[in-house]
Image (cartoon, rainbow, N blue to C red):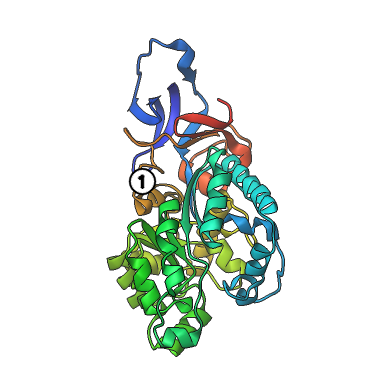
Amino acid sequence: MLLKNISALLGEELDFVSNVDIEIKNNKFQKIQPEIKSTLEKNTVDCQGLLLIPGFINAHTHIADSIGKDITINSTVNQKIHPMFGIKSKILKNTSEENLSSFMKNTCHSMISKGITTFVDFREGGLDGSLLLKKVSSDIPIRSIILGRLDFHQNSSEIKKNTPFPKEKIQDLPSLVKTCDGIGISGANEHSESVLTSYSKTKKLRSIHSSETRESIRKSKQITGQSETIRALSMKPDFLIHMTHASKSDLQAASKATRGIVICPRANSSLAEGIPDIEKMENAGCLLALGTDNVMINSPDMFREMDFLWKVTMGIKKKRIDPKNILKMATVNGGKILKKDIGIIQNKKIADCIFLDKHALDLEPMHNPHASIVHRASESCIKAVMIGGEIVHGKI
């Protein structure tokens, strides 16, 4: 396919180019330059009036939670989502696979329509839970990265005693790792050092929630005398989730030991836990990506996530932020953290992208493309979504 006369955000810095031709072949961007000649007119599309941007990477989700949208709105964080006794875990355990599958599929289609081309899901339910999501996403053209976990948590006494995995659980770990793209666990406060070390020896992607709430930080110090983040790092994660209340020293440690942090500002705010301090995180050297977290409490919409983070951060900090940096969190940075050729429009990278209508009512005139995308664009501005070189939503 050859895209002619299209505007685009190119490369790691999302540089705006007002008119360029882009050749897509074998699922990748093959040529990006002015006036590419083509001998195949039927595969040539005049894209005048369209802006091409990288597909969004939703770097942290729990899409099975979509079965419980807005349940227990006024409950505490632990009452809602605690992995051992929260209402979320009860709903997931007591819902049939058929119902879970139906709502997970709905969420996948919803994400595609909003320009999300890849999502990274922390999947509960052990091997069976991961297999279910793998089955659900197999016939939907969105790229899923499934981070599974064993259906296993420990109490404070077991953590203090550094109790290891029971034999019957540790035997299940190789099958889980083989099935998934990696491991994504709830947090250090539900696992002993021994268990975290066992997870650290797996050979695929590893990630863990950390320092999401002040209570979780306090609990870690109470149980072990250690920082929750320092304990989480003993799992040797490739990236951390949240870090909303992490200290400066924790962020510096995370910067040295991981590829980055995935923040979920709307979910944190929905749970009345504040928002991540992105300035402090970036000053510590952390690379940041965005996720929308639990569908139970938050919609899987990266447009809304970017808009919220940009404005609320400026409102709190009273300091202007370059909207390009927020857009990179939704695209380029996710690809870097995952070490995949996605989230960027560049030669030889996978052709995941969004076609925006530059003349959409909410966008025209577009004086600052990055700002317009971050706080004005929405699903209604999307003309088409491409994943792996194929149009999977809309048309151009």
Residue in front for this viewpoint, 206 or 305:
206
Q: Quadrant of residue 269?
A: bottom right
Q: Amino acid at mark 1?
A: Lys
Residue in front for this viewpoint, 346 or 257:
257
Task: Locate residue 59, reporting x and y percent.
Answer: 47, 54
Residue 209 in sight here: no
- Horizontal arrangement in the rendering, residue 28 relative to residue 215 (left or right): left
Category of crowding for the residue at label 1, using alpha-carbon neighbours closer than 10 angstroms: few (below 14), some (14–19), many (at least 20): few
The secondary structure type at the circle numbered 1 is: loop
**Residue at horizontal 47%, vertical 62%?**
263
- Horizontal arrangement in the rendering, residue 112 relative to residue 173 (left or right): right
**Residue at horizontal 65%, vertical 61%?**
296
Q: Which quadrant would the C terminus be assigned to in this image?
A: top right
Residue 131 in sight here: yes
Task: Locate residue 218, reporting x and y percent.
Answer: 48, 85
Residue in front for this viewpoint, 297 or 4:
297
Task: Locate residue 132, reporting x and y percent.
Answer: 57, 51
Q: Which residue is mark 1?
A: 340
Examine the rendered structure and indicate whether residue 61 appears above or below residue 271.
above
**Residue at horizontal 63%, vertical 39%?**
380
Single out the residue that lies furthest toward the left: 256
